[in-house]
Amino acid sequence: MYPNPFEYHRASSVDEAIALLQEHGDEAKIIAGGHSLLPTMKLRLANPEHLIDIAGIAGLSGVSEDGDMIVIGALTTHREVAENELIKQHAPVLGQIAHTIGDRQVRNRGTIGGAIAHADPAADYPAGIVALDAELVSVGPDGEHVTPASDFFVSIFTTALSPDEVLTAIRVPKAAAKTGMAYEKLPNQASGYAMVGVAAIVTLDTAGKASLVKIGVTGVADRAFRAEAAEAALTGAALDSDAVTAAAKDISGDNDVLGDVHASEPSRRRVADGLAARAVLAASKAAK
């Protein structure tokens, strides 16, 4: 199916993109790699009258260090995230996630910023973004804003971004010593999206117990969330299989769990529990 007609604009700067968003209001959408927006346009689920292409804006791609943070440009492709040495060293769960996204063509064109801003509840990155306590950097008419990941994802296809803001970067804290990370996913066989995805981050103390556990879950609810009860139960514990499995029971907690033709609500709950336990154990092993 073809999308409805639209007018195409190529922005040469963030300021120009913001001006175009203000000019065209609710009828405008940002596009970069296009692998999040274009499929919904072809299905007529999104029908913007104006597309604002930011792919050519300089300075919005690549990975760099800024003190104790890693800064990932919003236009950095999934392939670049998967292969970047700084990410492998300091935030490897993002590289693991990037490896699972789509196919080679999608990874070569799709961008981390586009996937995050699109806020599909089945997208992979949000699990890692919330687990990492990342910061989302955006620019609007009144300047730069920094939003914690915990406040960024609001609901299905909805974020804390204002309609006239552009996501420009993702800031991720560098991992502490003796930290391991893992991502486990049950993909939809047709699309590759996460029916359930769980990112786990584990830091071990000198006695081999967990001094820090973070668990991010995607594909289960209308937005990615942290499994705070399981995190609290595992912090300070020796992460053996029995303890992790027990803590991962009902990992979805009080969240309203999605049910659809691909997986019922009870099925998603069971899968989330199993993947959470698997991810925590894998992260613990990596930390050792």
Image (cartoon, helix red, strand yellow):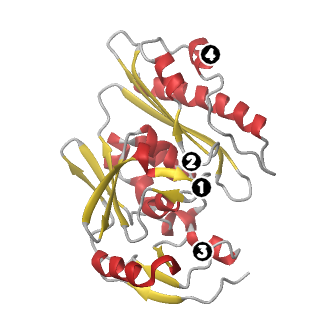
Does label 1 or label 3 sit earlier along the sequence?
3
- Where disc 3 sits, the SS reads helix
Rounded to the nearest angstrom, the CA distance separating label 2 from label 1 is 6 Å
Q: Which residue is mark 2?
A: 223
Report the label total: 4
Is 272 on the left-hand or right-hand side of 58?
Answer: right
Q: What residue is shown with label 1?
A: 156
Of discs 2 and 4, which sits in the foreground? 2
Q: Earlier in the sequence, mark 4 or mark 3?
A: 3
Q: Amino acid at mark 3?
A: Leu
Residue at image mark 3: 38
| Quarter of image, res 160 | bottom left
247 left or right of 165 in image: right
Name which of mark 3 and mark 2 comes first in the sequence: 3
Is residue 246 toward the left or the right of residue 67 in the image?
right
**Which of label 1 and label 3 is nearer to you?**
1
- Report which residue position mark 4 lands on: 246
